[in-house]
Image: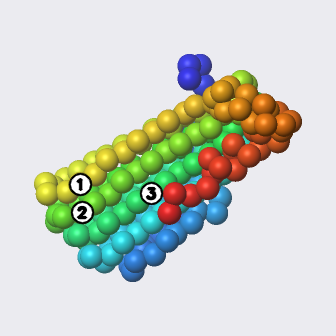
């Protein structure tokens, strides 16, 4: 979306989280995070769901740093913007040279419920070796009017239909 004015980057020091075993890590609040994946042959899932309301400015910046080989990592960030809120999701996968046979995937999804809400979703990859499988995806969208129409035609009020769609969107895929 054009003409979005947000801070360029965080001024606060990032929180470093060392993940040394297979785990499902849930980010509880927006912020600046560095995830260090340090144990070979582990499976890591990192997820966040968030809602921004009013004039809230929700910013999350994440670095997923692979420091060991053969790690499988899935990072999923989801956010919903209401009212005149602003959402910024920036995440990067960094794979060090010695981290062969790594599989890492990053997904950033934003749903805008209000026409005044704005969002940025910026995924990034930095791969310093070969023999890896990595990808990223990002989307910023609004609720399709066909979905609202379908639920309204089944007797639901618009507000209830929107709430159902938002809750379904925020459910984690894993």
Image coordinates for residue 150, horizontal then vertical, percent:
71, 32
| 84 sits left or right of 139 in the view | right
Q: Residue furthest bottom?
A: 21
- Circle 3 SS class: strand
Crowd tier of the residue under label 1, counting other residues whose Cα lies within 10 Å: few below 14, some 14–19, many 20 or above: few
Q: Are marks 2 and 3 in contact (CB under 8 Å)?
A: no
| 14 sits left or right of 99 in the view | right
| 48 sits left or right of 159 in the view | left
Whole-angstrom CA distance, mark 2 to mark 3, is: 14 Å
Q: Quadrant of residue 80?
A: top right
Q: Tell me the residue at 40%/51% (across/down).
A: 106
State the mark number for residue 75. 3
* Position above or below: 104 against 56: below
Crowd tier of the residue under label 3, counting other residues whose Cα lies within 10 Å: few below 14, some 14–19, many 20 or above: many
Crowd tier of the residue under label 2, counting other residues whose Cα lies within 10 Å: few below 14, some 14–19, many 20 or above: many
Q: Are marks 1 and 2 in contact (CB under 8 Å)?
A: yes
Q: Tell me the residue at 65%/49% (across/down).
A: 168
Kindly identify which residue carries mark 2: 102
- Circle 1 SS class: strand
- Circle 2 SS class: loop
Q: Tell me the residue at 40%/69% (across/down).
A: 44
Ranked by sequence position, the earlier of labels 1 and 2 is: 2
Can residue 53 be spotted in the picture?
no
State the mark number for residue 133. 1
Image coordinates for residue 141, horizontal then vertical, percent:
58, 31
């Amino acid at each position: 979306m054009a003409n979005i004015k947000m801070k360029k980057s965080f001024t606060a020091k990032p929180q470093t989280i060392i993940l040394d075993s297979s785990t499902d890590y849930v980010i509880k609040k927006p912020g600046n995070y560095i995830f260090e994946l340090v144990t070979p042959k582990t499976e890591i899932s990192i997820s966040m769901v968030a809602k921004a309301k009013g004039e809230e400015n929700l910013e999350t910046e994440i670095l997923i740093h692979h420091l060991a080989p053969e790690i499988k990592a899935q990072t999923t960030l989801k956010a919903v913007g209401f009212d005149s809120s602003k959402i910024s999701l920036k995440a990067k996968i960094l794979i060090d040279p010695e981290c062969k046979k790594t599989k890492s995937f990053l997904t950033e999804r934003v749903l805008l419920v209000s026409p005044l809400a704005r969002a940025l979703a910026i995924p990034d990859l930095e791969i310093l070796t070969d023999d890896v499988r990595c990808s990223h995806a990002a989307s910023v969208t609004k609720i399709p009017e066909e979905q609202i129409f379908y639920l309204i035609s089944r007797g639901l009020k618009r507000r209830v239909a929107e709430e159902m769609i938002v809750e379904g969107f925020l459910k984690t895929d894993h």
